[in-house]
Image (cartoon, rainbow, N blue to C red):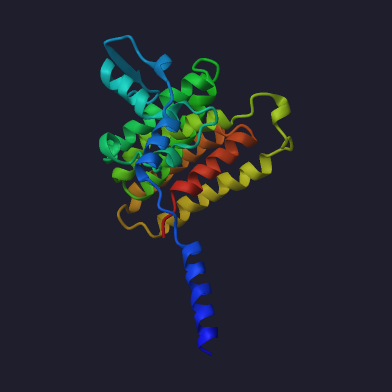
Amino acid sequence: MKKTFYILTIIIGLLSCNNHPKQVDKKTIAKTEITNSKVDNSKYYTKKDTVLIITEIGDTLKFAKAEFNNIVDKHTEFFKEYPENPDQTYFNGNDIEEFGSEVGQDNYYVLYAYFLKQKNGVKEYAQQRQKLIDIYSNINSLFGHFEYGGTYFGHQNSRILGYAEYSIYLLPKTKNDISKTYDISKQKEFYIKSLRQLIEDESEIDFNTLGKEKIERTKNLNKIVDELDKLITDNFYLRRAQEFQYGYYEYY
């Protein structure tokens, strides 16, 4: 019996040794990670004393040369061969320091759009870019009216630039990239009707505006939907509109 117990003790001891995590030098790991993640993006440096980023919505960001080049060095995600959407890149460790506040997040999305725009093509997709910005802005405006405003919708105005630019990256560039060639008129009709139904339903529970003011308010909300109806011209824009609405505007 003692002999059996002794053997079991040895086996357990050996298993414990094998399952014990290896002691790894954390400094070595950190050094390796830094080495592997170091990317030379100096070709994106500016030589100007000041960089002005003028957006499609009329806002302007201003950066001194050193500040701009520091952003280039620190944020290699802006220059990936295969970009990720701005929410992924922002919440992957970039929601701190200079971009940690709400305004900081706005600025991050503007910068994301600025750099990805150079990759996508500034002039080549100017029309498509503006259309996407207009679609997203109208959706943001519609839901902003439902909620009678709020800081979220104001910040979305800037962040829409990032979402729109990522959508340009996803845009089919040739006819061969398009697999869904069927007529989307019925699907679009259902989507537009769903927005008009939403206006009607929201109006029923809205007691902030009454009488003639409510009638006028409803007309103005439907005008926003009219604009969306004009902007959504094919399957790509319909899918982007739906994804944007369902991804960022859920209220209960």
Residue 64 is at least partly visible in this image: no
Residue at 50 percent across and 36 percent down: it is 84
Residue 34 vertical position relative to residue 121 in the rendered view, above or below: below
Indicate the quadrant where residue 125 lies. top right
Indicate the quadrant where residue 189 lies. top right
Q: Residue furthest bottom?
A: 1
Indicate the quadrant where residue 154 lies. top left
Q: Give percent across and percent down for residue 152.
A: 33, 44
Residue at 47 percent across and 64 percent down: it is 17
Residue 61 vertical position relative to residue 12 in the rendered view, above or below: above
* Image quadrant occupied by the C terminus: bottom left
Residue at 47 percent across and 53 percent down: it is 200
Q: Nearer the viewer, residue 146 or 169?
A: 169
Q: Give percent across and percent down for residue 236.
A: 61, 35
Q: Give percent across and percent down for residue 99.
A: 29, 36
Residue 131 vertical position relative to residue 216 in the rendered view, above or below: above
Q: Nearer the viewer, residue 23 or 57?
A: 23
Q: Give percent across and percent down for residue 146.
A: 38, 49
